[in-house]
Amino acid sequence: MNIIVCAKEVVDVSEIKTDPKTNKPILQGIDKKISDIDKNAVEEGVRIKEKLGGKVTVLSVGPSEAREYIKELLAMGADEAKIIPYADTGDYNVVSTILAGAINNLGYDIILCGEASIDLFSGQTGPRLAQKLGIPQITYAKKLEPKEDTITADRDLGDKKVTMESSYPVLISVTKEINEPRLPSLMQILGAANKPIEVIAHSSLVSEETSVLERIDIKGVSMERKNIIYKDDIDDAIGKLVENLAKDGVLG
Protein backbone atom coordinates (compact mmCIF):
# COMPACT_ATOMS: atom_id res chain seq x y z
CA MET A 1 0.00 0.00 0.00
CA ASN A 2 1.58 3.28 -1.13
CA ILE A 3 0.35 6.06 1.13
CA ILE A 4 1.04 9.76 0.60
CA VAL A 5 0.38 12.21 3.43
CA CYS A 6 0.27 15.94 2.72
CA ALA A 7 1.64 18.03 5.60
CA LYS A 8 2.05 21.76 6.09
CA GLU A 9 4.37 23.82 8.26
CA VAL A 10 2.41 26.54 10.11
CA VAL A 11 2.96 29.08 12.85
CA ASP A 12 1.90 27.99 16.32
CA VAL A 13 -1.43 29.84 16.44
CA SER A 14 -1.61 29.49 20.23
CA GLU A 15 1.30 31.94 20.49
CA ILE A 16 -0.05 34.63 18.16
CA LYS A 17 -0.62 38.02 19.75
CA THR A 18 -2.24 41.11 18.23
CA ASP A 19 -0.61 44.54 17.98
CA PRO A 20 -2.95 46.79 20.01
CA LYS A 21 -2.25 49.77 17.74
CA THR A 22 -2.78 48.16 14.34
CA ASN A 23 -4.91 45.18 15.37
CA LYS A 24 -2.67 43.03 13.15
CA PRO A 25 -1.30 39.66 14.27
CA ILE A 26 2.36 39.61 15.27
CA LEU A 27 3.91 36.70 13.39
CA GLN A 28 7.62 37.47 13.75
CA GLY A 29 9.50 35.24 16.14
CA ILE A 30 6.66 32.75 16.62
CA ASP A 31 7.53 29.08 16.77
CA LYS A 32 6.48 26.91 13.84
CA LYS A 33 5.29 23.32 13.69
CA ILE A 34 3.45 20.83 11.51
CA SER A 35 -0.29 21.57 11.41
CA ASP A 36 -1.99 19.54 14.15
CA ILE A 37 -4.52 17.72 11.95
CA ASP A 38 -1.78 16.77 9.50
CA LYS A 39 -0.21 14.78 12.34
CA ASN A 40 -3.50 12.90 12.65
CA ALA A 41 -3.25 12.14 8.93
CA VAL A 42 0.31 10.82 9.36
CA GLU A 43 -0.75 8.69 12.32
CA GLU A 44 -3.58 7.19 10.27
CA GLY A 45 -1.21 6.53 7.38
CA VAL A 46 1.20 4.68 9.68
CA ARG A 47 -1.66 2.62 11.11
CA ILE A 48 -2.77 1.60 7.62
CA LYS A 49 0.83 0.62 6.80
CA GLU A 50 1.03 -1.44 9.98
CA LYS A 51 -2.16 -3.28 9.00
CA LEU A 52 -1.66 -3.79 5.25
CA GLY A 53 2.05 -3.17 4.72
CA GLY A 54 3.54 -0.66 2.33
CA LYS A 55 5.19 2.75 2.55
CA VAL A 56 4.23 6.18 3.89
CA THR A 57 5.60 9.23 2.07
CA VAL A 58 5.19 12.74 3.53
CA LEU A 59 4.79 15.50 0.94
CA SER A 60 5.07 19.15 1.93
CA VAL A 61 4.93 22.45 0.03
CA GLY A 62 6.46 25.35 1.91
CA PRO A 63 9.69 26.85 3.21
CA SER A 64 12.81 24.70 2.99
CA GLU A 65 13.36 24.92 6.76
CA ALA A 66 10.30 22.68 7.15
CA ARG A 67 12.83 19.81 7.02
CA GLU A 68 13.32 20.07 10.80
CA TYR A 69 9.61 19.70 11.49
CA ILE A 70 9.16 16.94 8.92
CA LYS A 71 11.65 14.82 10.89
CA GLU A 72 9.02 14.50 13.63
CA LEU A 73 6.68 12.83 11.12
CA LEU A 74 9.44 10.45 10.05
CA ALA A 75 9.99 9.58 13.71
CA MET A 76 6.28 8.77 13.99
CA GLY A 77 6.69 6.07 11.35
CA ALA A 78 6.66 7.69 7.91
CA ASP A 79 9.31 6.18 5.64
CA GLU A 80 10.41 9.15 3.57
CA ALA A 81 9.62 12.79 2.87
CA LYS A 82 9.64 15.11 -0.13
CA ILE A 83 9.74 18.86 0.38
CA ILE A 84 8.88 21.34 -2.37
CA PRO A 85 10.17 24.79 -1.35
CA TYR A 86 7.72 27.55 -2.18
CA ALA A 87 6.99 30.99 -0.72
CA ASP A 88 4.11 31.01 1.73
CA THR A 89 2.26 33.58 -0.41
CA GLY A 90 0.80 30.77 -2.52
CA ASP A 91 -2.91 30.08 -1.98
CA TYR A 92 -4.64 26.69 -1.89
CA ASN A 93 -4.99 26.60 -5.69
CA VAL A 94 -1.24 27.03 -6.13
CA VAL A 95 -0.41 24.50 -3.40
CA SER A 96 -2.81 21.87 -4.77
CA THR A 97 -1.39 22.36 -8.28
CA ILE A 98 2.17 21.81 -7.05
CA LEU A 99 1.13 18.80 -4.96
CA ALA A 100 -0.65 17.26 -7.95
CA GLY A 101 2.46 17.72 -10.07
CA ALA A 102 4.57 15.90 -7.47
CA ILE A 103 2.06 13.11 -6.86
CA ASN A 104 1.71 12.40 -10.58
CA ASN A 105 5.33 11.28 -10.47
CA LEU A 106 4.68 8.89 -7.58
CA GLY A 107 2.76 5.65 -7.32
CA TYR A 108 -0.02 5.86 -4.73
CA ASP A 109 -3.10 4.11 -3.42
CA ILE A 110 -4.20 6.53 -0.69
CA ILE A 111 -3.60 10.25 -0.24
CA LEU A 112 -4.28 11.51 3.29
CA CYS A 113 -4.73 15.16 4.30
CA GLY A 114 -5.89 16.95 7.41
CA GLU A 115 -9.38 18.35 6.97
CA ALA A 116 -7.81 21.83 7.11
CA SER A 117 -4.63 23.55 8.26
CA ILE A 118 -4.80 25.29 11.63
CA ASP A 119 -3.62 28.63 10.21
CA LEU A 120 -6.02 29.31 7.31
CA PHE A 121 -8.52 26.48 7.92
CA SER A 122 -9.93 26.79 4.40
CA GLY A 123 -10.37 23.04 3.88
CA GLN A 124 -9.67 23.62 0.17
CA THR A 125 -6.40 21.87 -0.57
CA GLY A 126 -7.55 18.25 -0.24
CA PRO A 127 -10.68 18.54 -2.42
CA ARG A 128 -8.85 20.63 -5.05
CA LEU A 129 -6.03 18.09 -5.14
CA ALA A 130 -8.46 15.20 -5.70
CA GLN A 131 -10.11 17.15 -8.53
CA LYS A 132 -6.77 17.88 -10.20
CA LEU A 133 -5.75 14.21 -9.95
CA GLY A 134 -9.15 13.00 -11.13
CA ILE A 135 -9.64 10.57 -8.24
CA PRO A 136 -12.48 10.00 -5.71
CA GLN A 137 -12.37 11.82 -2.40
CA ILE A 138 -13.83 11.27 1.07
CA THR A 139 -13.80 14.31 3.36
CA TYR A 140 -14.13 14.73 7.14
CA ALA A 141 -13.32 11.09 7.88
CA LYS A 142 -13.31 10.27 11.58
CA LYS A 143 -12.81 6.51 11.22
CA LEU A 144 -11.17 4.39 8.51
CA GLU A 145 -11.37 0.65 7.84
CA PRO A 146 -8.81 -0.17 5.13
CA LYS A 147 -8.92 -3.47 3.24
CA GLU A 148 -6.88 -4.87 0.38
CA ASP A 149 -9.15 -3.57 -2.39
CA THR A 150 -11.38 -0.96 -0.72
CA ILE A 151 -11.48 1.44 2.20
CA THR A 152 -14.52 2.38 4.29
CA ALA A 153 -14.80 5.73 6.06
CA ASP A 154 -17.20 7.18 8.61
CA ARG A 155 -17.69 10.87 7.83
CA ASP A 156 -18.40 13.45 10.52
CA LEU A 157 -21.13 15.79 9.25
CA GLY A 158 -22.05 17.34 12.57
CA ASP A 159 -25.57 16.13 13.31
CA LYS A 160 -25.24 12.91 11.31
CA LYS A 161 -22.74 10.25 10.30
CA VAL A 162 -22.32 8.98 6.74
CA THR A 163 -20.41 5.81 5.86
CA MET A 164 -18.74 5.66 2.44
CA GLU A 165 -16.64 3.09 0.64
CA SER A 166 -14.13 3.65 -2.15
CA SER A 167 -11.71 1.65 -4.24
CA TYR A 168 -8.14 2.83 -4.71
CA PRO A 169 -6.73 5.32 -5.50
CA VAL A 170 -8.60 7.74 -3.23
CA LEU A 171 -7.95 10.97 -1.36
CA ILE A 172 -9.20 11.16 2.22
CA SER A 173 -9.19 14.18 4.51
CA VAL A 174 -9.35 13.29 8.20
CA THR A 175 -10.64 15.09 11.28
CA LYS A 176 -8.73 15.57 14.52
CA GLU A 177 -11.03 13.06 16.23
CA ILE A 178 -9.85 10.15 14.08
CA ASN A 179 -6.94 9.25 16.38
CA GLU A 180 -4.33 10.40 18.88
CA PRO A 181 -0.95 10.88 17.17
CA ARG A 182 1.79 8.79 18.79
CA LEU A 183 4.76 10.28 20.60
CA PRO A 184 7.98 8.91 19.06
CA SER A 185 10.50 7.23 21.35
CA LEU A 186 14.08 8.48 21.61
CA MET A 187 15.28 5.66 19.34
CA GLN A 188 12.64 6.55 16.73
CA ILE A 189 13.68 10.21 16.84
CA LEU A 190 17.33 9.27 16.34
CA GLY A 191 16.41 6.81 13.58
CA ALA A 192 14.46 9.50 11.70
CA ALA A 193 17.76 11.23 10.91
CA ASN A 194 18.63 8.35 8.58
CA LYS A 195 15.37 8.44 6.62
CA PRO A 196 15.49 10.15 3.20
CA ILE A 197 14.23 13.71 2.72
CA GLU A 198 14.23 14.84 -0.91
CA VAL A 199 13.96 18.48 -1.95
CA ILE A 200 12.17 19.01 -5.27
CA ALA A 201 12.08 22.30 -7.20
CA HIS A 202 8.47 23.31 -7.84
CA SER A 203 9.45 24.57 -11.30
CA SER A 204 10.12 20.97 -12.33
CA LEU A 205 6.53 20.00 -11.51
CA VAL A 206 4.35 22.76 -12.97
CA SER A 207 4.93 25.41 -15.59
CA GLU A 208 2.63 28.04 -14.10
CA GLU A 209 0.69 28.56 -10.89
CA THR A 210 -2.20 31.01 -10.59
CA SER A 211 -3.50 32.29 -7.27
CA VAL A 212 -7.27 32.61 -7.12
CA LEU A 213 -7.24 34.22 -3.68
CA GLU A 214 -6.05 37.77 -3.08
CA ARG A 215 -5.08 38.45 0.51
CA ILE A 216 -5.88 42.09 1.16
CA ASP A 217 -5.33 42.34 4.88
CA ILE A 218 -5.26 40.32 8.10
CA LYS A 219 -6.58 41.74 11.35
CA GLY A 220 -7.19 40.29 14.77
CA VAL A 221 -10.56 40.03 16.45
CA SER A 222 -11.09 42.35 19.40
CA MET A 223 -11.38 40.35 22.63
CA GLU A 224 -11.88 43.12 25.18
CA ARG A 225 -13.24 42.02 28.54
CA LYS A 226 -16.11 43.81 30.29
CA ASN A 227 -14.59 43.11 33.73
CA ILE A 228 -17.98 42.72 35.39
CA ILE A 229 -17.67 41.17 38.85
CA TYR A 230 -20.70 39.69 40.61
CA LYS A 231 -20.42 39.97 44.40
CA ASP A 232 -24.03 39.12 45.29
CA ASP A 233 -25.38 35.90 46.73
CA ILE A 234 -24.36 33.03 44.48
CA ASP A 235 -27.91 32.34 43.26
CA ASP A 236 -28.54 36.03 42.52
CA ALA A 237 -25.14 36.32 40.80
CA ILE A 238 -25.88 33.34 38.56
CA GLY A 239 -29.25 34.81 37.63
CA LYS A 240 -27.70 38.17 36.69
CA LEU A 241 -24.91 36.47 34.74
CA VAL A 242 -27.38 34.41 32.69
CA GLU A 243 -29.54 37.50 32.08
CA ASN A 244 -26.57 39.57 30.84
CA LEU A 245 -25.27 36.75 28.63
CA ALA A 246 -28.71 36.46 27.06
CA LYS A 247 -28.81 40.22 26.39
CA ASP A 248 -25.40 40.06 24.70
CA GLY A 249 -26.58 37.21 22.49
CA VAL A 250 -24.21 34.64 24.00
CA LEU A 251 -27.14 32.47 25.12
CA GLY A 252 -30.01 31.68 22.78
Image (cartoon, rainbow, N blue to C red):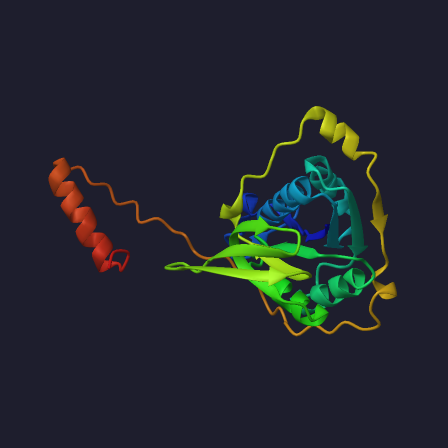
- Locate residue 15: give its quadrant: top right
- Asked if residue 33 is positioned above or below residue 209 in the image, the reply reads above
Q: Is residue 4 visible?
A: yes
Expressed as whole percent of the image width and height from the top left, the position of residue 154 reads 49, 55
Expressed as whole percent of the image width and height from the top left, the position of residue 12 reads 59, 45
Expressed as whole percent of the image width and height from the top left, the position of residue 102 reads 80, 61
* Identity of the residue drawn at 49% across and 47% down: 177
Q: Quadrant of the C terminus?
A: bottom left
Front one among 97 and 62 = 97
- Locate residue 48: give its quadrant: top right
Q: Is residue 228 left or right of residue 158?
A: left
Front one among 69 and 24 = 69
- Locate residue 69: give its quadrant: top right
* Identity of the residue drawn at 67% across and 68% down: 135
Front one among 185 and 243 = 185
* Identity of the residue drawn at 66% across and 31% down: 184
